[in-house]
Image (tube, rainbow, N blue to C red):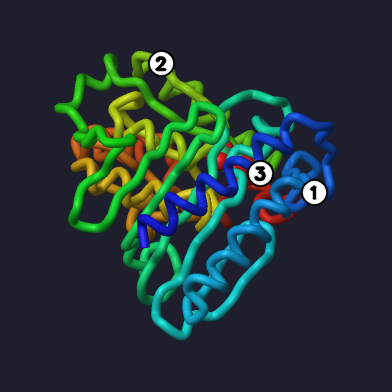
Amino acid sequence: MKDIAIELAREAGELIVAGRAGDIAVQNTKSSSVDIVTAVDQASEELLFSRLEALRPDDGFLGEEGRTKESVSGTTWVVDPIDGTVNFFYNIPHYAVSIAAVSGNPVPGSWVVEAAVVYNPVTQEMFHASRGEGAFLGDKRLHITEPPSLDQALLGTGFAYSDAMRREQARVLVDILPQFRDIRRQGTASLDFAYVASSRLDLYYERTLMPWDHAAGELLVTEAGGVIEGLADMPPGREGIFAGHPTLVHRLQELLHELGADTPLLDVPGWGLDS
Ligand code: LIP
């Protein structure tokens, strides 16, 4: 399954890079006016869906741009055809095709990620993993290093498309930013996970991610020796997801608890009204 994912990520990557060479227009918006989708997002998902339909006709599909199909085989492909769409739209060369094959119930916290690929078609960096067989960048095996102290740790994070959630994220940022080496908001969740797996980030944390943002990244991190955890006692997913060495993950969880920032999204003032 990983070999299929690598092949299809490359094919979608060629389509995306070719599309980026032309004019890019916003085709539609989703959860908010800044949650955009382009024709290239949709073309990439259509390519991935149709190729998987041909190669793995009994598998399910869950795509960001609306393509869904129930699984007969027990395997479901969870796909973000362009993760980092805003970066793509602004021609910032930091976006990825994210493809995960999961078994079981295709729901975050329930699924078992069996194979994962996160591919940046601009840099042509292919991050990949199969469950139990390690995580790789190209041919290089990835291992998460021993954690630095918090004030030496580089933290990755991201911000929601929701104004209400952004206010909450800004409130938290004021307190946690001074406690870390620095923070990186790079705009592509799947690459943030890949960067944790490849020690380009020490830790990553974000709230309001969708399943296709983190499915593949989860396996890259765990196969590199890191952990994927949720917020408080909630499963990793839209409520919140952490990736990194357990020591750093648990320290950040403590910080967020002290800030009262680990309660369900529905407790965030205004959440749901604009998301
Ligand atoms: C994006 C994520 C990013 C997050 C953005 C958005 P998209 O996914 O990769 O980490 O901060 O809000 O969810 O919308 O580009 O597929």
C-alpha span from label 1 to label 3: 21 Å
The residue depicted at 45 percent of the width and 49 percent of the height is: 240
Where is residue 245 shown, x and y percent of the image?
22, 36
Amino acid at pointer 1 = Thr
Q: Is residue 135 left or right of residue 1?
A: left
C-alpha span from label 2 to label 3: 35 Å
Q: Of label 1 and label 3, which has the lower sequence position?
A: 3
C-alpha span from label 1 to label 2: 32 Å
Secondary element under disc 1, as helix, strand or loop, is strand
Answer with the quarter of the image where residue 92 lies: top right
The residue depicted at 38 percent of the width and 37 percent of the height is: 194
The residue depicted at 58 percent of the width and 35 percent of the height is: 159
Badge 2 density bin: few <14, some 14–19, many ≥20, Cα 10 Å: some
Answer with the quarter of the image where residue 85 lies: top right
Q: Of label 2 and label 3, which has the lower sequence position?
A: 3
Q: Name the residue under label 3.
A: 15
Q: Mark 1, mark 3: which one is toward the viewer?
A: 3
Q: Name the residue under label 1.
A: 29
Q: Mark 2 points at which residue?
A: 182
Secondary element under disc 2, as helix, strand or loop, is strand
Q: Which of 158 and 263 is in front in this view?
A: 158
User: Which residue is the extreme one toward the left?
Assistant: 146
Amino acid at pointer 3 = Leu
Picture mark count: 3
Q: Of label 1 and label 2, which has the lower sequence position?
A: 1
Q: Reply above or below: 234 against 35.
A: below
Badge 1 density bin: few <14, some 14–19, many ≥20, Cα 10 Å: few
Question: Does any atom of ligand 1 lie closer than 8 Å to the CB of label 3?
Answer: no
Answer with the quarter of the image where residue 45 lies: bottom right
The residue depicted at 25 percent of the width and 48 percent of the height is: 222
Amino acid at pointer 2 = Asp
Question: Does any atom of ligand 1 lie closer than 8 Å to the CB of label 1?
Answer: no
